[in-house]
Amino acid sequence: MSKRNKATIHDIASKLGITASTVSRALNNHPRISDATKKLVQKTAREVNYQPNNIAAALRIGKSRLIGIIVPTANRNFFSSVVRGIEELANKLDYKVIICQSYENYKKEVQTIDALLSARVDGIIMSIGKNTEKFDHLQRVLDKSIPLVLFDRITDQIEVNQVVIDDYMGAYKSVQHLIDNGYKRIAHFTNPRKINIYSERLRGYYDALKDNGIPLDPELVIESNMQLEDGKQNIVNMLESNLGFDAIFSSSDYAAMGALQMLKEKNIKVPDQVGLVGFGNEPFTSFTEPSITTIDQVSIPMGNVAAELFFELLKADPKKFIPQKTVLKPELIIRGSSVRKIKETV
Amino acid sequence: MSKRNKATIHDIASKLGITASTVSRALNNHPRISDATKKLVQKTAREVNYQPNNIAAALRIGKSRLIGIIVPTANRNFFSSVVRGIEELANKLDYKVIICQSYENYKKEVQTIDALLSARVDGIIMSIGKNTEKFDHLQRVLDKSIPLVLFDRITDQIEVNQVVIDDYMGAYKSVQHLIDNGYKRIAHFTNPRKINIYSERLRGYYDALKDNGIPLDPELVIESNMQLEDGKQNIVNMLESNLGFDAIFSSSDYAAMGALQMLKEKNIKVPDQVGLVGFGNEPFTSFTEPSITTIDQVSIPMGNVAAELFFELLKADPKKFIPQKTVLKPELIIRGSSVRKIKETV
């Protein structure tokens, strides 16, 4: 610690000729200390550049007032909006959040848990990576009775508080909407890793087709990593294999965007020849031509709920913990890519 | 700490019948401890769910191996790419990063500094908010000899390591490119807050016009917050006031995107009637029609350099600190919005 010359409460005490205990109580807003003394202590604390040693406090009372958040990447509108929803509530309660990114990398996710515990967060709110199949690192957090809440990408393999949207319903609504607009050969872009969100969306896709008496064709279910380039490549492959399709429901806005670009390159008209629905309501879906119909994942409310579940855990007795799962309703945002122009009759 | 039942090195020691000091040295890979003992201690540590108390270690040796990053928002391709650049180097050196967002809010920025210091980060890498005009919170960090590096949005009011792009050059190149494509009445979208990046870009805009003998018209310099809606509104205002313009150099991709949308709504052809250049190379600039010419801010290298400056500070003697400023060259990405079609001669 040699380089860092930290002022302590003792420095403030000796400067003011009062006891360190009085300084401490003044800084902690103790009712027995007069307002005048509190003001004087605060002023002196600023003068000597006193930094409250919150770590020592954390070690003592187990509260750093920090929430650790882990997301695959912060550079996604969905994840950043959930973080914003968490911060809204956290800041009201005088908590701060710190964010770590796992980059969908399992090893990094594990290390990140350790980094957050080192930073002495009071708990963790996270969305698991696509490639995470073991959950020991999360179980370790639970075993320490450190509050943990999962959102969006969850697992049922551990007993933990969770908040998700109804992915099944989002998919079902999307496909029903395409059917209502006269599309019949509806392809589905999905991820080979069947984490909860993708398996639920696939189920919704199948059920909507079934309920409308449309035969299921497994060849129309296209697996990829669903980045923009994957969406483009999917279209190339689908056209080459003469699959015959008149709509796409993509589990990812990025793949939907790639599909739109490639369809245009191939002079296939959206929505007239091919209808398109994405998932996630990333801002760019409203910028394209046509704009892309998509599912809004109510991300700010999801963050609010995640924070609520977190603060409930924080004050609850861990021995009496009963895991809760909150399911939010997603919203279909209808835009140009899926609404066919009504043919004019002359 | 009542709820959190943490295993200590004493638990490991008593389980193995060795001293706590031996356990500690084994865990810290001390050369005097045999490999057999090290393995045994590590195995037992895992069994009892031992979590190394890095905070205690941090208090002792001042190293948490955490770097705190503050950005206005992580949901910007530029900021998230800089973070990625920082992480590339940090992870190689076994450091982790934690990210906080200031949301361009001065008060939040100050609180975030405190939160990161509470989390005992070894130092901070940050980009300051648009509305930050006082820098006491940064000076406090410097006064403690805690490494601090600023990137992109910087200030010359404190002595600190900095990495920026040459915003002047980026602007100059953009405007020269528009002039080379035959545009003459070039408007500039800027921010009323003249933090370094905006004042340098404005200077580059002026100088490029001057050097090409094009008269400066202050009415063509349009101030706004430069979000998407501002870009739209700017176009509406410019058309209503009959300003007469044939190109726009926008200090923000978001405002450029808004401008493009409104120009299309008004049936004004880009690039034939109005040329457009943005700044930042946000991914959506390549998705639009036409795609938007913009300045790439070499964000990954900027993150690499910021991390390098950080690690230099970390090992340097703070008494011998001489602030460094690294200036990176930005790149003009020429796309459809600024290149006029050559008129066919029949």
Image (tube, coloured by chain):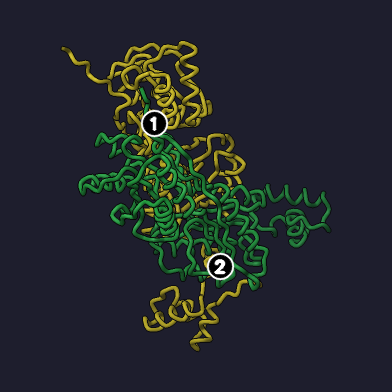
Chain colours: A yellow, B green
Please provide percent x and percent y for residue B169: 49, 52
- From the viewer's perspective, is B183 left or right of B324? left
Q: Residue furthest front?
A: B346
Q: Is residue B321 visible?
A: yes
Residue at the spot of label 1: B341
Q: Tell me the kind of residue under disc 1.
A: Lys
Q: Is residue A86 visible?
A: no
Residue neighbourhood size for the residue with mark 2, other residues' Cα within 10 Å, grouped as few (<14), some (14–19), many (≥20): some
Please provide percent x and percent y for residue A18: 49, 86
- From the viewer's perspective, is B324 left or right of B71? right
Please provide percent x and percent y for residue A275: 34, 21
Which label is found at residue A10?
none
Q: Residue at x 53, y 25 (%)?
A: A192
Which label is found at residue A56?
2
Please provide percent x and percent y for residue B213: 39, 52
> Does residue B329 lie above or below B194 as drawn?
above
Of residues A323 and A185, which is closer to you in this image?
A185
To which chain does the residue with label 2 belong?
Answer: A
Q: Residue furthest left?
A: A346
Q: Tell me the kind of residue under disc 2.
A: Ala
> Does residue A134 lie above or below A36 as drawn?
above
